């Protein structure tokens, strides 16, 4: 058993509650909402935080130079609780299933269009209930459709107008609704973040274990 595995076993259940989130970056100055740097993604303009103790499967974040611990001054909104049906109807999409079937783009979200269409159709088929007049679309589909309908800039503005300062995807859902394998918080209003000190970036498991260790050994 390696050192990290041993520490994880010893410290099982010990939370680093002072700063439960962290941000990784190539920039040595405190994080701000920056240009995407050429990255092609359609999520809102914001500051992206990972969650200590939750594995980030994507490898691209590990080489980043710096890690900033963070905590929020407000509770984040859970993406699973967003009223996607209501919002999509407001934007002219009253029947998400019909909308998806008529899409003609090559990809939507992180999947080819035909796979996404199959996923949505399967969701509706599996949730048919004679007592329900309307099936509420799942967050994993609703968020992708909202991004497709609005586009990145309008999505950011839309969510802010709904009073959302930060929203998160920390569920145990296998795919994660914001992006596969990345449980995270997206902060739209940087003023709600309280930053800890800048440190050298290390993988999430080590961040979690070493932070917990500090809380035990520090008088």
Image (cartoon, helix red, strand yellow):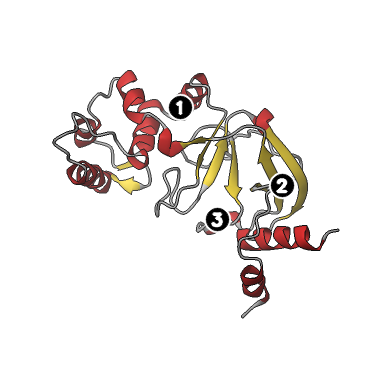
Residue lying at the far right in this picture: please name it: 219
Element type where label 1 sits in the image: helix
Q: Is residue 68 left or right of residue 167?
A: right
Quadrant for the N terminus in the image? bottom right
Q: Pick the residue in front: 53 or 110.
A: 53
Q: CA distance from mark 3 to mark 2?
A: 16 Å
Q: Is residue 122 left or right of residue 140?
A: left
- What residue sits right under mark 1 in the picture? 155
Q: Position of residue 184 (x, y in %)?
A: 53, 45
Q: Is residue 210 left or right of residue 37?
A: right
- What residue sits right under mark 2 in the picture? 18
- What residue sits right under mark 3 in the picture? 54
Q: Quadrant of residue 94?
A: top left
Element type where label 2 sits in the image: loop
Q: Position of residue 40 (x, y in %)?
A: 48, 41
199 versus 154 height, above or below:
below
């Amino acid at each position: 058993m390696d050192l990290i595995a041993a520490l994880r076993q010893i410290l099982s259940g010990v939370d680093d509650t002072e700063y439960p989130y962290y941000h990784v970056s190539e920039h040595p100055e405190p994080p701000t909402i920056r240009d995407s740097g050429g990255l092609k993604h359609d999520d809102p303009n914001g500051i992206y935080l990972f969650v200590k103790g939750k594995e980030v499967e994507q490898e691209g974040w590990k080489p980043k130079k710096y890690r900033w611990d963070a905590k929020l001054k407000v509770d984040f909104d859970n993406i699973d609780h967003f009223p996607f049906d209501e919002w999509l109807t407001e934007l002219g999409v009253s029947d998400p299933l019909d909308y998806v079937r008529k899409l003609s783009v090559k990809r939507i979200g992180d999947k080819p269009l035909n796979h996404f269409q199959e996923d949505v159709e399967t969701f509706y088929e599996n949730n048919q209930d004679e007592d329900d007049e309307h099936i509420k679309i799942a967050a994993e589909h609703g968020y992708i459709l909202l991004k497709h309908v609005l586009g990145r800039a309008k999505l950011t503005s839309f969510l802010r107008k709904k009073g959302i300062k930060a929203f998160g995807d920390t569920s145990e859902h296998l795919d994660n609704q914001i992006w596969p394998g990345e449980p995270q918080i997206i902060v739209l209003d940087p003023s709600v973040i309280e930053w800890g000190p800048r440190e050298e970036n290390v993988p999430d498991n080590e961040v979690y274990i070493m932070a917990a260790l500090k809380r035990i050994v520090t008088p």
